[in-house]
Image (cartoon, helix red, strand yellow):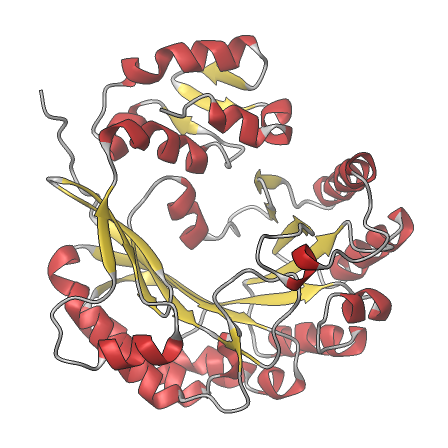
């Protein structure tokens, strides 16, 4: 019997703004260094992109918007204001819709935080990475430690009660004391949410081609991560996702929708999306080069980018790749609701992972153990076709 799918009523919108002042050597995102940004033309292309997508999601409520990049805070606040107004005019936003904007601690962008708040942004995500000037230079960041602290102060002064700080660890030449010092500096600001990432050498980046010297070995990085996460737990920021910690009620709702295998539109250069319809689950990907994207979006063509169905045999792995990032796990019935497949299909893999101590099951909820989070890739591999 053909599996049935019932699209959820709510969904998220991801908006990609692809420009930065400079490209960091570790970054594998679709971002491009530029002196001048065609902000108004790009915003018009985004809305033209959204207009093409409307028939696929008509009638669903918009519960979150995430404006990522790149460095979205380089865009003028008035352009962001108009963009959000145009999105609200076309969709059905929830009254308490979360709107996140990624920002970097450059002085120009930080001065605009109040205007972003007035434009409708409810949450900032600040790319701090480190408060150590030596490590910031090695990472290719254009801000220093003082600018990072000023940016946080300006975000708080702009009445962003909800904000996230990004920190990285296992940096070239970083000691345990330096990693802990970065975290304790961040905690002085009492952030409601903190994302903690290990520096990895991603394929295609300058760091992958020319690895920096003095990279910590795996054991050192694992020990560093363990101590950092213990400190976060002791400061009321428990881990709720592989890379994220938050105070009660401050989890990023947009990202939780990803991890719960929810639906989301992606608009912008290189943006990805996932939409469930009665006949299947579809992935979308938009043209990655900004100029090509704008030309295509503002043309008369009917479709923009690529749309591919997710085969039945790949859905269990895709589902688990997302939900097993969450420490809370997922109710087993969600597998059927989000994939259209019977729970019995994954029962052998669930039993095996439970025997191996990678997951635990209680009252119909499956969640990764601490060991399962530590061996996340191996756990998810159990569900490959």
Report which quarter residue 267 is drawn in: bottom left
Q: Which residue is nearer to you in this view: 172 or 160?
A: 172
- Which percent across, then down, holds residue 243? 60, 45
Residue sitting at x 61%, y 67%? 126
Q: Is residue 334 visible?
A: no
Q: Relative to 68, does residue 358 appear above or below in the rendering?
A: above
Q: Nearer the viewer, residue 114 or 292?
A: 292
Quadrant containing the N terminus in the rendered view? top left
Image quadrant where residue 157 sits: bottom right
Q: Position of residue 377 (x, y in %)?
A: 55, 31
Relative to 208, 277 lies left or right? left
As drawn, 111 above or below 373: below
Residue for point 26% across, 81% down: 295
| Rendered location of residue 342, percent (x, y) | 23, 19
Residue 158, compared with residue 359, is above or below; it is below
Residue at position x 57%, y 12% from top?
356
**177 sits left or right of 130 in the view:** right
Looking at the rendering, which quadrant does residue 5 occupy?
top left
Image quadrant in which the C terminus is located = top left
State left or right for residue 40 relative to residue 150.
left
How many numbered markers are drawn?
Answer: 0
Q: Nearer the viewer, residue 292 or 129?
A: 292
* Vertical relation: 343 (above or below) 181: above
């Amino acid at each position: 019997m053909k599996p049935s799918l019932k699209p959820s009523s709510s969904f998220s919108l991801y908006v990609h703004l692809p420009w930065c002042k400079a490209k960091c050597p570790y970054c594998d995102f679709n971002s491009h260094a530029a002196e001048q940004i065609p902000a108004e033309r790009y915003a018009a292309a985004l809305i033209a992109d959204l207009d093409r997508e409307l028939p696929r999601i008509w009638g669903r409520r918009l519960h979150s918007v995430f404006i990522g990049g790149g460095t979205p805070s380089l865009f003028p606040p008035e352009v962001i204001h108009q963009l959000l107004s145009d999105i609200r005019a076309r969709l059905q936003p929830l009254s308490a819709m979360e709107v996140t904007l990624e920002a970097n601690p450059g002085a120009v962008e930080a001065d605009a935080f109040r205007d972003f708040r007035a434009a409708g942004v409810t949450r900032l995500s600040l790319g701090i990475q480190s408060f150590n000037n030596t490590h910031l230079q090695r990472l290719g960041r254009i801000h220093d430690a003082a600018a990072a602290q000023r940016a946080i102060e300006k975000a708080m002064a702009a009445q962003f009660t909800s904000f996230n700080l990004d920190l990285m660890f296992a940096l070239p030449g970083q000691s345990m004391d330096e990693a802990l010092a970065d975290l304790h500096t961040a905690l002085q600001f009492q952030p409601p949410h903190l994302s903690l990432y290990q520096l990895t050498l991603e394929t295609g980046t300058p760091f992958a081609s020319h690895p920096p010297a003095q990279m910590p070995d795996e054991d050192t990085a694992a020990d560093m991560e363990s101590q950092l996460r213990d400190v976060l737990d002791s400061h009321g920021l428990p881990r709720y996702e592989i890379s994220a910690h938050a105070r009660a009620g401050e989890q990023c709702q947009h990202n939780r929708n990803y991890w719960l295998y929810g639906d989301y539109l992606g608009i912008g250069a290189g943006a990805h999306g996932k939409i469930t319809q009665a006949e299947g689950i579809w992935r979308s990907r938009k043209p990655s080069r900004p100029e090509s994207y704008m030309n295509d979006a503002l043309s008369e063509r009917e479709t923009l980018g690529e749309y591919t169905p997710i085969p039945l045999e790949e859905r269990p792995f895709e589902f688990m790749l997302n939900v097993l990032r969450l420490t809370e796990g997922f109710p087993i019935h969600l597998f059927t609701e989000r994939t259209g497949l019977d729970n019995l299909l994954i029962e052998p893999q669930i039993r095996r992972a439970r025997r191996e101590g990678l997951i635990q099951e209680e009252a119909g909820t499956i969640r990764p153990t601490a060991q399962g989070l530590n061996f996340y890739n191996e756990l998810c591999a159990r569900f490959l076709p």
